[in-house]
Image: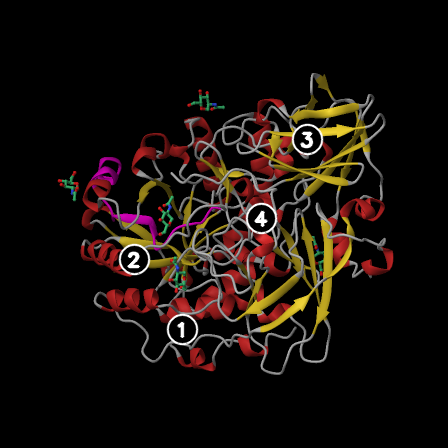
């Protein structure tokens, strides 16, 4: 998996490393010049034209490539978040290895001559699971997130006491490239409005990072009142469609003097499963950018390169109902999910060039792409057949069902099992009160798939069963709310299910280690039972394949499949949901595939229905916009046979 083709072009070595070779450490400074409404960098007027790039959405070997392209676009800074839940998987256990090595990322940024605007949270939104907060915080069920609740503050304090001292040497005046640090994130949009929490955070930053570093807050126009804090520089965020004059005037109410700053200027937008793909027109984006730069404002473009929500890391929003974010975080950004320069980038670069020098010379061409397949996958067996491997410790027993958090299952799947204590001869309503399915349930009676229940969308099924029948409810955590709510988003069965008039009790809960099983490279086929008909319900499929010499990045397409999770060589690519869209392909960076001659393995956990021919294909371009406009390569006959899809989503 050598990233030979991805190393930084040697051209970079010829560029002047101005920022790396400052005169003297003690002359380095980045400050607000209130007299002239601007920033000063080393005493010289300075304005940043920055772009967001999240290291946690890009494999490490591709960081340098993406940063190089950003520098070549004329940016002088990048902005990124630090997701707490990515680095502290269990209380007191820290991970800064591999793709989690944010200091290696800071180093790559300095090689690319980019200053850094850091947003360490603790809450980051970012459409990331739980807005970056660790799910283990919810093991204290009454915790008040993002407030001065002592349980929350204690966890934040201990995390920042680990993180911030590591950040300290990277501050600009200490010889590093971090020029400013954001406190919290759009806190004013959270309905707690707890100023003592914000003051506590600012105090913690000051105590651990010193007085010199510029601290700032970012809020949308409606959030400034609760999000701004005296002594911390107030900035705003808005997109091309918003009224710049009006919103900068609001910033002036909080900062009568100093630079105008848009900390999140939206180049595109995020996608939800079941809704249309979001785009922002090039003209709108460049016009807005030009207007801000004319005013002398500093701007960060969110996103400049979006990347991917690999694994289970996507967040979700709540707008009347639960809306999980797609696996792709392409964002219609200037650099595509696969790292290619788009026409939007050229247009933005052109605008920037009217205001400041940009690097000369051509921009890198798109990376090579490949198209292979189709490949037919083999059935490995029902998920229920592998419970002993997926949950080797055996189940937890409880009269009433427990949440994922209560049994320390942060992500993925948990199976809830009970046995009917009486026979149910007529189709009888099975449901969970108070919208208590978080977030999707796959229901089996004696191993036979009955259908699904879904949060805010599908509330009931009708079941029958003999006395002693085994009722299995597989719960999928589709990503915790990252914005739009001020309550804790517990996962699993939040209430005991009801069958007819009976509250079902005596549950066995199997927290599933699906990723471990897939990574073991277990020859699942050897274990499978014989299956006569096309199976439905949660089922594993896999196959092996090899690639040709001219391998490139590619996009995995699962035509006619319904919904599930997919792994390549044990790496969790993320969720697919062909049935809903708009995303129809998953980005597969070349580096995940073995060179010619070595077998690659693909594993799919399909949760509902597969097409009669369980095939997949690797395409040479992505399909991200296929909610209503079906661009299927295969016939969709399989799709129409399936009746497990709940009501169509209505847009709003
Ligand atoms: C990180 O890497 C170090 C050294 O390779 C290793 O000892 C440690 O266990 C790793 N930590 C995690 C959380 O993977
Ligand atoms: C959450 O928001 C609601 C509605 O604004 C409010 O009534 C409630 O007190 C808030 N809860 C917390 C914990 O801030
Ligand atoms: C933008 O806001 C300003 C100040 O509030 C107002 O004068 C102007 O008419 C607005 N522009 C548009 C296009 O709405
Ligand atoms: C979807 O995207 C493709 C490729 O960018 C484009 O050709 C097509 O017109 C788009 N379709 C819709 C409905 O937006
Ligand atoms: C989605 O896109 C289609 C085609 O452009 C359009 O007809 C439809 O109204 C859009 N839906 C929403 C909710 O915007």
* Magenta stretch in the rendered image: 249-272
Camera-side residue: 248 or 29? 248
User: Viewed as shown, does residue 64 lie left or right of 425?
Assistant: left
Please state the horizontal and vertical placement of residue 120, each as a whole percent of the image.
49, 46
Disc 2 is placed on an element classified as loop
Give me the C-alpha separation between circle 3 and circle 4.
Answer: 19 Å
Q: Disc count in the image? A: 4
Q: Which residue is mark 2?
A: 281
Disc 3 is placed on an element classified as loop
Judge depth for marks 1 and 3 and give the one in front: 3
Q: Are marks 3 and 4 in contact (CB under 8 Å)?
A: no
Q: Residue at x 55, y 31 (%)?
A: 153
Q: Mark 1 packing: few (<14 Cα in 10 Å), some, or many (20+)?
A: some
* Of callouts 4 and 2, the N-terminal one: 2
Camera-side residue: 177 or 591? 591
* Of callouts 1 and 3, the N-terminal one: 1
* Of callouts 3 and 2, the N-terminal one: 2
Q: Taking 292 as reference, is 158 above or below it?
A: above
Q: Is mark 1 within 8 Å of ligand 1?
A: no
Disc 4 is placed on an element classified as loop
Q: Quadrant of residue 296?
A: bottom left
Give me the C-alpha separation between circle 1 and circle 3.
Answer: 52 Å
Q: Which residue is mark 3?
A: 403
Q: Are marks 4 and 1 in contact (CB under 8 Å)?
A: no
């Amino acid at each position: 998996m050598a990233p030979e083709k991805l190393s930084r072009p040697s051209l970079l070595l010829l560029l002047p490393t101005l920022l790396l070779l400052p005169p003297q450490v003690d002359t380095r400074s980045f400050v607000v010049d209130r007299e002239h409404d601007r920033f000063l960098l080393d005493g010289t007027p300075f304005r940043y034209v920055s772009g967001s790039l999240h290291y946690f959405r890009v494999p490490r070997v591709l960081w340098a490539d993406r940063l190089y392209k950003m520098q070549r676009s004329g940016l002088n800074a990048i902005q990124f978040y630090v997701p707490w839940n990515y680095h502290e998987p269990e209380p007191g256990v820290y991970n800064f290895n591999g793709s989690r090595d944010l200091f290696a990322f800071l180093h790559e940024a300095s090689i690319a001559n980019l200053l850094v605007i850091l947003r360490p949270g603790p809450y980051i939104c970012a459409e990331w699971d739980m807005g970056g907060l660790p799910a283990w915080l919810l093991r204290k069920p009454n915790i008040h997130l993002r407030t001065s609740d002592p349980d929350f503050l204690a966890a934040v304090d201990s995390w920042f006491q680990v993180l911030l001292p590591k950040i300290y040497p990277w501050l600009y005046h200490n010889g590093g490239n971090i020029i400013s640090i954001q406190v919290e994130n759009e806190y004013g949009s959270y309905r707690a409005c707890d100023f003592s929490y914000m003051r506590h955070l600012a105090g913690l930053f000051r105590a651990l990072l010193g007085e010199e570093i510029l601290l700032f807050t970012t809020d949308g126009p409606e959030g400034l009142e609760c999000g701004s804090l005296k002594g911390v520089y107030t900035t705003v965020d808005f997109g091309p469609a918003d009224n710049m004059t009006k919103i900068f005037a609001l910033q002036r109410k909080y900062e009568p003097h100093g630079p105008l700053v848009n900390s999140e200027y939206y180049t595109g937008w995020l996608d939800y499963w079941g809704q249309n793909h979001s785009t922002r027109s090039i003209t709108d984006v460049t016009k807005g950018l030009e207007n801000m730069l004319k005013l002398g404002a500093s701007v960060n473009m969110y996103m400049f390169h979006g990347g991917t929500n690999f694994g289970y890391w996507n967040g979700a929003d709540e707008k009347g109902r639960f809306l999980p974010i797609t696996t792709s975080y392409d964002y219609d950004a200037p650099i595509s999910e696969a790292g290619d320069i788009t026409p939007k980038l050229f247009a933005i670069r052109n605008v920037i060039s009217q205001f400041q020098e940009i690097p000369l010379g051509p921009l890198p061409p798109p990376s090579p792409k490949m198209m292979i397949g189709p490949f037919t996958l083999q059935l490995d067996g029902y998920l229920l057949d592998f419970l002993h491997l997926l949950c080797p410790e055996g189940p937890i027993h409880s009269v009433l069902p427990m949440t994922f958090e209560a049994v320390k299952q942060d992500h993925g799947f948990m199976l809830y099992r009970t046995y009917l204590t009486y026979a149910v001869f007529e189709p009888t309503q099975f449901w969970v009160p108070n919208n208590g399915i978080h977030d999707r349930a796959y229901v089996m009676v004696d191993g036979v798939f009955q259908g699904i229940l879904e949060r805010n969308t599908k509330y009931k099924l009708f079941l029958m069963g003999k006395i002693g029948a085994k009722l299995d409810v597989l719960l999928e955590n589709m990503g915790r709310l990252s914005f739009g709510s001020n309550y804790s988003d517990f996962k699993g069965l939040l209430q005991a299910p009801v069958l007819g008039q009976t509250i079902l009790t005596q549950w066995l809960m199997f927290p599933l280690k699906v990723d471990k099983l897939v990574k073991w490279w277990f020859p699942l086929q050897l274990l499978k039972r014989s299956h006569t008909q096309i199976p439905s319900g949660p089922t594993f499929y896999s196959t092996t394949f090899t690639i040709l010499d001219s391998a490139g990045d590619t996009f995995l397409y699962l035509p006619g499949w319904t919904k599930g999770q997919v792994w390549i060589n044990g790496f969790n690519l993320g969720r697919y949901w062909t049935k809903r869209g708009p995303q129809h392909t998953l980005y597969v960076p070349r580096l995940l595939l073995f060179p010619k001659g070595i077998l690659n393995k693909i594993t799919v956990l399909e949760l509902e229905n597969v097409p009669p021919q369980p095939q997949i294909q690797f395409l040479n371009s992505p399909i991200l916009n296929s909610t209503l406009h079906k661009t299927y390569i295969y016939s969709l006959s399989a799709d129409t046979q399936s009746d497990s899809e709940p009501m169509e989503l209505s847009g709003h």
